[in-house]
Amino acid sequence: MPTTVTPNGPDDSGSPHPFIPNTSADRAAMLDAIGVSRFEELVHDIPAAHVYPELRLTDNTPEPALTAELSALANSNATPGEYACFLGAGAYRHFIPAVVRAIASRGEFVTAYTPYQPEASQGTLQVGFEFQTAVCQLTGMEVSNAGMYDGPTAFAEAALMACRVTRRRTVAVLDTVDERLVEVLDAYVRYQGLEVQVVDSSSLRTPDGAACLMAQSPNVYGVIENMQSFIESAHSVNALAVAHVNPTSLGMFKSPGEWGADIVTAEGQPLGVPMSFGGSYVGLLACRQAHVRQMPGRVIGRTTDTRGRRGYALTLQTREQHIRRERATSNICTSTQLIALMATTYVAAMGKNGIRRIAELCYQKAHYAANRIARLPGYSLPVEGTFFHEFAVQCPRPPAEINRALLERKIIGGYDLSRRIPNGMLVCVTEMNSRQEIDSLVEALEDAGGRA
Amino acid sequence: MSSGPAARDRRLLMERSVPGRFAVAIPESDVPPAELPESSLLRDDLDLPEVAQLDLVRYFTLLSQLNFSIDTNFYPLGSCTMKYNPKLNDEAAALPGFSQIHPAQPFETVQGALRLMYELQQMLGEVTGLPGVGLAPLAGAQGEYAGLLIARAWFDSAGKSERTVALIPDSAHGTNPASAAMAGLEVVTVPSNDQGNVDLEALRAACDERTAVFMLTIPSTLGLFNPNILDITEAVHEAGGLVYADGANLNALLGLVKLGDLGFDICHSNLHKTFSTPHGGGGPGAGPVMVAKELASFLPAPVAALGDDGLYRFERPENAIGKINGFHGSFSILVRAWTYMRSMGRNGLREAARNAIINANYVQAKLRDRFDLAADRHCMHETVLSARRQKARGASALDIAKRLLDYGVHAPTMYFPLIVDEALMVEPTETESKETLDRFIRIMRQIDEEIDQDPALLHEAPHDLPNTRLDETTAARRPYLRWQQET
C-alpha cells in the first residue's frame, strides 16, 4: 500500500494530489498575497484542541491499484446477464441502447449544476422540458415536474400534494399497493398530522373526507388495477385519484390520464436507467394543470429572451424551499436531472413504436412463462386479473428455498411474496429474458418444487 | 451561416419527428404469442417522437454544448462545491458488477456491493467523527429530513415528544426550514451577529424545554467558522436539545476537524459536493446521515453490516425511522464517493480542505479593495462578497453575475445568504489552479471597471450565450411546461 500522498519529488515541491493543482510555490505565493505566513493562521477559529484530528483512513491509492480493487469488488457480485434474472418488484432489467449511455456520459451534462443561471444552462433546461413533455405523453397528464428522487418518494410527495390541494388530512391507500411504497409514505406523513388509511380493494370505498385514494398499477401482485372503479371511488367523495404506474406498461395500456387520474407517479428506472443496486433512479410526478402550483419539485418552463428567441428557465419557484423556506411545497432541492436525461433519451431512442413493442415483448414473454409455470405440479397462479410483466406464483415450498436451488443453476428467482401469499413469489419477465432462460427457469422450478 | 451557439437549431424532439423513423431496432418475439387484454384496457395513441439515431445524437450533443459545466468552465458557485469530478469515479459506477445488479438480489450474490457500502459508512463516520452512518438519503435535503426524523424519534423514545422546535439561523439554506416543517417541527429563526456568526446570547435565549434541534451550517453560509462553536453546542445540550450540522460546507473541514468532536450529534453530507460526485445538472446526489453512537439505532433502513461469518448483509436498525426511499440509497453515487475517498486518502482529503481554504482566501484578498466583504476576516472555503458599492454605481450583483458568463465563468451564488445585500458567494474549490483564480480576479476587476465605462455591457449581459436574459416573469405567470402541437 502506498505510504504517503504524493510529493512529486524529494523536495515536496509539487502538487499534493492529481486533483489539487497548487504546488508548494503556488501556496507560498498565495499565502503571501493573503498576508499570512502559515496556513494555520487562516483556521485559528477552529478550537485548538480539535485541529488536525487523527484520521483512521488509508493513504491515497493511485488509479491503477484502485481500478484493480474496484474490478475485484464489482466482479464478486452476481450480475444479471451472467445469471438469468427474474426479479422485479420495483426495479426492472431492460435493454438500454448504447446511445443513451453515450449521451448521459457527456461531461457538459454530468458536471453542470442545477440550472440557476438559465443562460448558461440551456442544455440542461431544454432536456428537462423534453422530459416533462415525454412524461406527459406517456401518462396522458397535463403537467409534469422535472423529476423526483425515485418512484416511492414521488408517491409519498403526491399524497402530501393531495392534502394541500384538498386541505384534507387523510390519505387512503389501496391494500394492493406494495408495502415498500407505503413504508416511504409513512415516513413522509409521520409528523405532519396526517393519517394513512388502508382501503380494502374488494369493497373499494374511499373514506369520507379523504384527500386522495392511491392505487398502484400494475399492483403488488403485478395485476392491472381496475382504473375506472378506483378513480370513480376517489371522485365519489371528492378525493383526488393518485395512480402509481409502471412506465413501460404505458407502452400498451391506456394511460392514467385517459382514465381520469388527478396525479400520476412512477418509478422512472425502467426507462433506460441501469438497476445499479437500487439507485440512482428518477421519480415521475405528473398532474392536472389546475394543481400545478401545489406540485413539489423543480419545473422548467418555456419563455423568450430579450431578443424574442425561445429559451427555458426554472419556473414557479415560489413553491420551492429556497424562496418559501418552511412554507415550501417540499424540501426537495437537488433531485435527479441526469437520470431524467437518461429517461428522456431512452424514450426518444425507442420512440413511438419502440416503447409499444418493448411493452408487448414483456407482456408476451411474461405470459409464456406464466402459462408454463401454471402447468407445473405444485405451482399455481393464485391471483386473478390481467397482468403485464410480473405475476404471483404460489410455490410448493418457501420461495427462499426455491431461490437457493435456482441460484445453483445461475438463475436469480422471483421476489419473495410470502408476506402476502403463502409460499408466494413474484416473477418478473422482461424483453431481456430469452425463451431459453424462461424454459430453464421452468425446468429449475419443477426440479426445486419436487424436492419438497 | 453563423455557427455560434445562438444560431443553433433548438427545435424540440417532436418538431424533428418524421413518421416511420426510429433510432433503435427492437427484436422480434421468440415465444408463442399470447392473447392481448381486452381493447378497452389498451391505448391507441402514443404521441412520442420518431427520429433516427444520428439525429438523436446530434440533438443531444448540441444541447450539451449549450451548458456551462465543470469540465468546460470555472464554476465558482458558492455553497455548491463545484470541484473536479474524477473520471475514474464514473467508470467505477458503470462497471457491470455494480451498474447491472438488482437491489433485491440475495445478499450472498452482492457481497462486493455491500462491502463497498460498509466501507463507505466507516469512512464517512471517521471523517465526521459521528460513527452511526446511514447511506439511504438520496440528496442533502433528504439527509436533513432523515436526521430530523431521527431526532424526533429519539425524543419520542425518551418521553420528550414536546420537543418540537427547530432553531435555525437566519443565514441557513432554505432546505433547513423546509425539512424541519416536513418533520412537523416549528421553525424559530435565530439572528446572526454583526460578524455573520450565530448570536450566542440570542441562541441561549431561544433554547428551552421545547427545543428539539439547533441546525447549523458549518462553516456558515458566509464561509466562516464560528469561533464560539463549543459554547454553541454546549448551550443547546444544556437545554436538552440536539445539534444538527448541515454538511453542505464539509469540504472545508476534511481532516481539519471532526463534527463529532465539536459536539454535533447529527449531520448530513452532500456527496455531490464534498466527495466529488457529479451534480448532473441537478442530481442525482446522495445525502448520507451521520449520527452519534446513541442515535445509531434510529438510522433509516437499511444499513450495511458485517456479520461474524465474514459476510455483509443489510440490517434494519432496531429503532429505525423506517424507509425514506425505495431501496438502499443512491448506490451509483456511493460508488463514486468511495472511489474518491480511497483515491484521496487521509492526506489527500486534508490537502483538499487546506487548498480550498487557501484558494478562497486568495480570491478574497485580491478582490477586497473593489468589493465589500460580508465579513471582514479570513474565510474558510468560500468568500461572500457584497456588490453594494457596485449597486450604488448602477450595477447589481445580478448584472455582475450575468456579465461573468460572457467571460466564460459561471456566476457565483447570488443573493444568498439572505442576510447580505447584493451577495456574491464565491467558492473556488481546491481543484482550481492559481492561474484560473488569477484570471477570475482579473475578470472581476475588469467588470467592476466596466460599470463606469460602459454600464450597458452589464445591464444587457450575457451577450454571447445561447440566450440573452430570459423573461422569467412571463414564464411563471403563463406557465408553458411541455411541448404542445401549435394550433
Image (cartoon, rainbow, N blue to C red):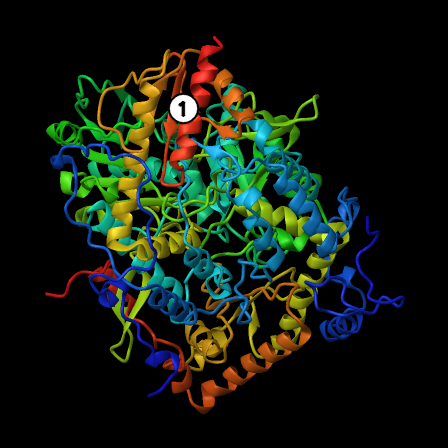
Label 1: chain letter: A
Q: Position of residue B184 (x, y in %)?
A: 40, 33
> In the rendered view, does A423 fall on the left or right side of A31?
left
Residue A408 occupies which quadrant of the picture?
Answer: top right
> Which residue is at the far right?
A10
Q: Is residue B262 above or below residue B107?
A: below
Residue A177 coordinates in the image, percent (x, y): 31, 26
Q: Quadrant location of residue B478? A: bottom left
Residue drawn 31% across the image and 53% down it: A350
Tell me the residue at 49%/27% (across/down).
B321
Confirm whether residue A190 shows in the render.
Answer: no
> Which of the two residues, A191 or B404, is positioned nearer the viewer here?
B404
Residue A325: percent from the left, percent from the top? 39, 48
Question: Residue at point 28% right, 42% down?
Answer: A359
The x and y percentages for residue A9 are 86, 67
Q: Is residue A420 left or right of residue A407?
A: left
Q: Quadrant of residue A283?
A: top left
Q: Nearer the viewer, residue B280 or B41?
A: B41
As helix, strand or loop, the secondary structure at mark 1 comes to helix
Q: Is residue A67 visible?
A: yes
The residue carrying pointer 1 sits among few (fewer than 14), some (14 to 19) or many (20 or more) residues within 10 Å by Cα, namely: some
Looking at this view, name the residue that lies furthest to the top.
Answer: A452
* Residue at numbered disc 1: A442
Q: Amino acid at mark 1?
A: Val
